[in-house]
Image (cartoon, helix red, strand yellow):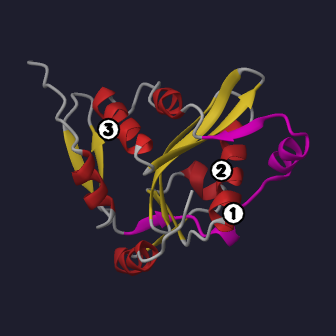
Amino acid sequence: MPQLQPEPLDPILVINAYAQGIFPMADELGKISWYAPDPRAILEHHNLHLSHSLKTTIRKRRYQIRTDSAFEQVMRLCGAREDTWINEEFIKTYTYLHQKGFAHSVEAWEGSQLVGGLYGVTLGGAFMGESMFSLATDASKVCLVALVDHLQAHGYILHDTQFITPHLATLGVTEIPRTDYEKRLQAALKLRCTW
């Protein structure tokens, strides 16, 4: 079977798609498809669930939390799994969006080692979470807690997680109808939140 070449991801197209509630993912051959799930998964910040063990990890300050200090590395580690949509084309495009202030990472460091992180796209008052990874206990969850604190402090009103997974459900992610999501997205896009 011939190997398909990855399709180019135009950064302007990507941003315009997010503004309409649509996002891209690639299959194992690099073919890009566009998604607008119904229902849509979101994290209501007041619903964020912190387990007892996660609270303990945070209290012990095991990890140093940073933002935007290793964006491309976070993307690569998020994509370093058998089943992933994060190929070189995505890394190139989203790193460009990061350089332009549209994409951000939150990272957990243990000394000089990056052990957890997440990244996503921001538009107005919306954060669209893309992926997370963890190489140490609770590292990505600690990043999520730090992200929620950051988003709340800066006035963000929509935290999109796209799809729900059993893991995200344990953290408080829920689903809403796409029509509700679109209304909330339009309200969020009117804001001028800074990262």
User: Contact (CB < 8 A) between labels 2 and 1?
Assistant: yes
Q: Amino acid at mark 2?
A: Leu
Residue at the extreme left: 2
Q: Secondary structure at mark 3?
A: helix
Residue shown at 22%/53% (left/top)?
13
Work out how far the residue at label 1 is from the one at label 3, CA to CA, in angstroms.
Answer: 30 Å
Name the residue beneath numbered marker 1.
48
Viewer-proximal residue, 172 or 154?
154
Res. 138 in view? no
Quarter of the C terminus within the rendering: bottom right
Name the residue beneath numbered marker 2.
144
Q: Is residue 187 left or right of residue 44?
A: left
Going from N to C along the chain, the mark reached first, 2 or 1, is 1
- Residue 115 picture location, percent across and down: 67, 28
| Number of dots carrying numbers | 3
Viewer-proximal residue, 1 or 79?
79
Q: Is residue 83 above or below residue 106?
A: above
Name the residue beneath numbered marker 3.
93
The part of the chain drawn in magenta is 39-67
Q: Amino acid at mark 3?
A: Thr
Q: Secondary structure at mark 2?
A: helix
Work out how far the residue at label 2 is from the one at label 1, CA to CA, in angstroms.
Answer: 9 Å
Q: Is residue 1 above or below residue 34?
A: above
Q: Quadrant of residue 189?
A: bottom left
Q: Quadrant of residue 91?
A: top left
Q: Amino acid at mark 1?
A: Leu
Q: Is residue 23 above or below residue 174?
A: above
